Amino acid sequence: MADDLPLVTDFDSSAVERARYHPESGTLDIWYAGGALYSYFDVPEEVYRALREAPSAGEFVNLEIKPNFRFALEPGRRRFRPD
């Protein structure tokens, strides 16, 4: 990974708050606006770079990351639905 690439990126987005990339494992952690933290696995550096440059982080995640990479919700976190 290039030394000048930030490993943490904050977004001005209504859907995505922050992303952190782990180059040694290819894990991309994404914090969503609702507070959920998801980890996506085996994400190439090029995908992280493209996310950082995307005009819409939320759209990029929905089209390029969610359908293509395994993921896990942050352990211990629960999601509740209204009744």
Image (tube, rainbow, N blue to C red):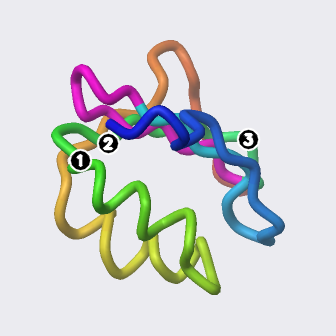
Query: Is residue 3 part of the magenta span, yes or no?
Result: no
Q: Are marks 3 and 2 in contact (CB under 8 Å)?
A: no
State the separation of the CA atoms marked 3 and 2: 16 Å
Q: Position of residue 64 (x, y in %)?
A: 31, 74
State the separation of the CA atoms marked 2 and 1: 7 Å
Q: Are marks 2 and 1 in contact (CB under 8 Å)?
A: yes
Closest to the observer, 78 or 18: 18
Q: Which mark is residue 35?
A: 3
Position of 67 with respect to 49 (left or right) is left
Q: Amino acid at mark 1?
A: Val
Q: Residue at x 48, y 66 (%)?
A: 51
In this rendering, the label closer to the viewer, 3 or 2: 2
In this rendering, the label closer to the viewer, 1 or 3: 1
Q: Which residues are magenta?
A: 22-32
Q: Secondary structure at mark 3?
A: loop
How many marks the image carries: the answer is 3
Q: Position of residue 1 (x, y in %)?
A: 32, 36
Residue placed under numbered mark 1 in the picture: 43
Q: Position of residue 61 (x, y in %)?
A: 45, 69
Q: Amino acid at mark 3?
A: Gly
Q: Secondary structure at mark 2?
A: strand
Disc nearer the start of the sequence (3/2)? 3
Residue placed under numbered mark 2 in the picture: 40
Q: Residue at x 63, y 40 (%)?
A: 36
Q: Amino acid at mark 2?
A: Tyr
